[in-house]
Image (spheres, rainbow, N blue to C red):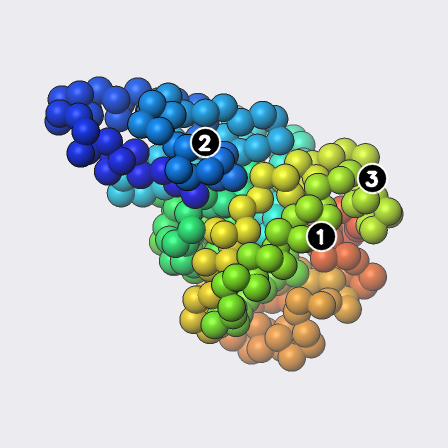
């Protein structure tokens, strides 16, 4: 949960003192863990900001009017690729993909979405504010629109919302959740997400459940699960029902069969102007289970 430090200190310090404290807090490197009892968060603790260990999240720069997300930036090429991970993942989830892209001369932005990785939490997040955070973050680092934007699962949903403002030359949706069923009970969702988060926080358990994971894959995904915030994700999932249509230059890469993209969904995507490419036998994280096939079906990106 984000700490509204400015309002927390406004009643006890002068405007000039508050500005000085806020400047110090805004440049700090860590927020207080959300599990810390609220009644023990004293004024000094709010302003000094407690430290996380390596299994917790560290925030990106953020301001009162927008959230800038953490970015793992790689490569120095003139063409930018934006990567958006799925639920309970992080920018590190693309660790196999990034070296292939930088070798092709791309500058790569692998973002941590709100409530994931090292980006800040937001218990009032909506799909619109998540998309705005992506757009603002990319614009803060690159003046030109990205050549290609890739979103996986939940990240594809965010990309579908952000695409009109982000303006990528090509949008790639990987085993994408291009609809959102809202109205779920928030408390039940938080509980379910927390149980899933705990189950995924062990690399050994992940490799047992997903034998196609390498040791590095399991470490990355366990670390991402440990940093995942169920409250942030539940806020998005409790929104209204949504459905997105592909933009003019859109590719859907799906596992076949897919628990996320039915044959009807794929046909609808194609009818609306997108192109569908399927990878038989692939897992939901296609590039983990079928890396060579994944790169082969996207010559626009890897060819």
Q: Is residue 34 visible?
A: yes
Q: Which mark is residue 204?
A: 3
Between circles 3 and 2, the one closer to the viewer is: 2
Residue 96 x %, y %: 71, 37
Horizontal relation, residue 55 to residue 201: left or right = left
Q: Residue at x 50, y 30 (%)?
A: 58
Q: Secondary structure at mark 1?
A: loop
Relative to 189, is 20 above or below? above
Horizontal relation, residue 11 to residue 206: left or right = left
Q: Which mark is residue 285?
A: 1
Q: Residue at x 57, y 64 (%)?
A: 188
User: Sequence order check: which comes first, mark 3 or mark 2?
Assistant: 2
Location of residue 173 by image quarter: bottom right
Between circles 1 and 2, the one closer to the viewer is: 2
Characterize the local packing of mark 1: few (<14), some (14-19) or many (20 or more) Cα atoms within 10 angstroms: many
Q: Secondary structure at mark 3?
A: helix
Characterize the local packing of mark 2: few (<14), some (14-19) or many (20 or more) Cα atoms within 10 angstroms: many
Horizontal relation, residue 201 to residue 80: left or right = right
Q: Which mark is residue 158?
A: none
Residue ID for mark 2: 32
Residue 39 x %, y %: 39, 37
Structural distance between the alpha carbons of marks 1 and 2:
32 Å
Residue 211 x %, y %: 86, 47
């Amino acid at each position: 949960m984000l700490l509204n430090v400015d309002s927390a200190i406004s009643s006890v310090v002068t405007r000039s003192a508050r500005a000085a404290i806020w400047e110090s807090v805004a440049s700090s490197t860590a927020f207080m863990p959300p599990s810390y009892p609220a009644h023990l968060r004293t004024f000094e603790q709010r302003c000094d900001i407690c430290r996380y260990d390596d299994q917790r999240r560290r925030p990106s720069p953020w301001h009162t009017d927008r959230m800038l997300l953490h970015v793992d930036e790689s490569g120095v090429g003139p063409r930018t690729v934006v990567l958006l991970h799925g639920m309970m993942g992080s920018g590190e989830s693309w660790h196999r993909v990034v070296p292939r892209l930088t070798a092709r001369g791309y500058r790569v932005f692998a973002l941590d979405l709100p409530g994931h990785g090292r980006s800040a939490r937001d218990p009032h997040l909506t799909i619109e504010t998540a998309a705005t955070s992506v757009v603002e973050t990319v614009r803060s680092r690159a003046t030109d629109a990205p050549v290609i934007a890739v979103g996986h699962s939940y990240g594809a949903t965010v990309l579908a919302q952000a695409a009109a403002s982000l303006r990528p030359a090509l949008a790639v949706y990987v085993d994408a959740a291009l609809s959102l069923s809202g109205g779920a009970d928030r408390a039940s969702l938080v509980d379910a997400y927390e149980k899933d988060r705990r189950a995924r926080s062990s690399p050994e358990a992940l490799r047992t459940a997903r034998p196609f994971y390498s040791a590095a894959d399991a470490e990355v995904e366990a670390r991402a699960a440990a940093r995942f915030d169920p409250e942030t994700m539940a806020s998005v999932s409790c929104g209204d029902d949504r459905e997105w249509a592909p933009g003019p230059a859109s590719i859907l890469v799906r596992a076949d069969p897919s628990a996320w993209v039915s044959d009807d969904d794929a046909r609808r995507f194609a009818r609306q102007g997108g192109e569908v490419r399927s990878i038989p036998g692939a897992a939901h994280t296609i590039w983990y289970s079928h890396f060579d096939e994944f790169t082969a079906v996207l010559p626009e990106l890897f060819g």
